[in-house]
Amino acid sequence: MMRPEDGNNTQPWTDPYRQGLRLYRQGRYDQAAEVLSTVPERSNLAGAVARYYQGLSHRALGAQAVAQGDLTAAERHLAAAAGFLGREGDLPGYLACLYARTGRLDACLRQTDKALATGGADVRTWLRHAQAQWRTGRRDEAQMTLREGLRRLGDQVDLHNQAGLFLAAQGRWPEAREAFARAVQADCSRPAGHENLGLAAAATHDCRAALRSLQRAYELRPNDMVLAHRLALAAKAVAGQDEQVVIRLPESQVRPLASQMVHLAHYVTVEGEFVDAFLALPPSDVDAELFAVLEAALQTAIARHGDYADLHLRASAVLERMGRPEEALGHARAAVDINGRYVRARLHLGKLCAAAGLDDEAVEHLEQAIAQGADWADVHCLAADLLASGGRTAKAKRHLRRALKLNPGYPRAAKALASLAA
């Protein structure tokens, strides 16, 4: 929401950022990865976005290598993708990871101790208690907690899986493999269970079983770049035993998990500058994807906090960027209705009204914004333009004179005033 008089904020990375994203959209993944690598990390959000699409470019190159039977190239590209993306090969998950939360183990233990003492604890309570015990060095107690939870609650996939992780951390791979197998048997739809079973199989030198489990895990979670890399490694290991290998890299499915969107909604609620950083990005070929995710997060936040004017303002700005002016107007009006003295919202609404041809309403909002603190040269010029187009030249001149007083020699104001005086 930069004012015109603030000038051009083009950065040295703007051109490679736009060019790299254009190449990605054109399917020229090798070139896209190369160009995006020149966008510096210190460019903040632009650097993060560039790294995301650089990772997706390597993912696509890995998939091409798999289709060509080149497992060495596939492993190399998928390793690069995992390095850029971590596990999150989908945009909502990647952005959700920008917001990290930490827990206090001692407090966790005190709470779970109380819950377990009541005798009515659920699976999550048993799990959290065991994890907190493990992290505070009480490893034998953690394993006993899981065994007791399984005795009381029966065959619970999360408890089996956690038991396997504890055993794996101690290098007890055969036992860990048995625990992971029980987890998969309890619920075969969980990708983590198949992945852990595959890793345990690899640790016990059963590469063929590892490949089967990792393939199944990746089919269930096709956006996971770390998992894709592990699958390629397993395939290379089996191929090295002179066995025929066929692996499949299913198409990525961008289906944001509810938990991811909740994290993003919380983020845009408490860290509004995150949205502003998106809006400051130069236009690019991936704007539709970027801002669709951001809009979904904002709408989720608004569903919980409909009386937050700043959420409505940012939703309006995002919708404007997406080319949906009527919806943008609706949220801008909501922001002003909630807080009539919200200068930034009032100014934004005035500009939207002007763009929609609602000149009288636009002037009203702009003048209220000026009275409330937006006494800026470019705002006076916009009000003057609208007034002049409606034949109210005297009032337009007053705005232009004020603009020149605030910014002597301001070319836009000087030219407009000269035109009205002619």
Image: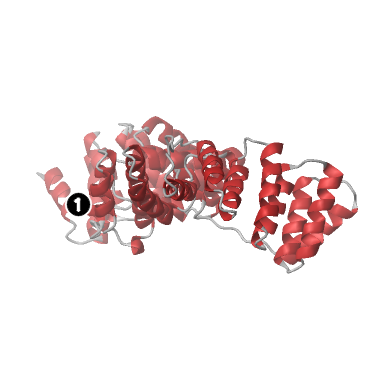
Q: In the image, what residue occupies the spot 79% across and 53% down?
A: 146
| Residue 136, position as x, y percentages in the image | 73, 68
Question: Is residue 373 toward the left or the right of residue 186 in the image?
Answer: left
| Residue 61 in the image: above or below residue 76 | above
Of the residues shown, which amino acid type is indicated by label 1?
Answer: Ala
| Residue 39 in the image: above or below residue 279 | below
Q: Nearer the viewer, residue 185 or 236?
A: 236
| Residue 67, position as x, y percentages in the image | 34, 37
Q: In the image, what residue occupies the spot 84% across and 53% down?
A: 115
Can the viewer see residue 280 in this picture? no
Question: Is residue 81 toward the left or the right of residue 409 in the image?
Answer: right
Q: In the image, what residue occupies the spot 42% across and 34% down?
A: 251
In which quadrant is the C terminus drawn? Answer: top left
Label 1, secondary structure: give it: helix
Q: Nearer the viewer, residue 228 or 284?
A: 228
| Residue 345, position as x, y percentages in the image | 44, 46
Can the viewer see residue 35 in this picture? yes
| Residue 411, position as x, y percentages in the image | 16, 54
Most extreme residue toward the front, as rendered?
A: 242
| Residue 299 in the image: above or below residue 43 | above
Mark 1 = which residue? 413
Q: In the image, what residue occupies the spot 68% across and 36% down?
A: 187
Q: Nearer the viewer, residue 273 or 381?
A: 273
Question: Is residue 85 toward the left or the right of residue 159 in the image?
Answer: left
Mark 1 crowd level (few <14, some 14–19, many ≥20, 10 Å Cα):
many
Most extreme residue toward the bottom, as rendered?
A: 137
Q: Quadrant of residue 141?
A: bottom right
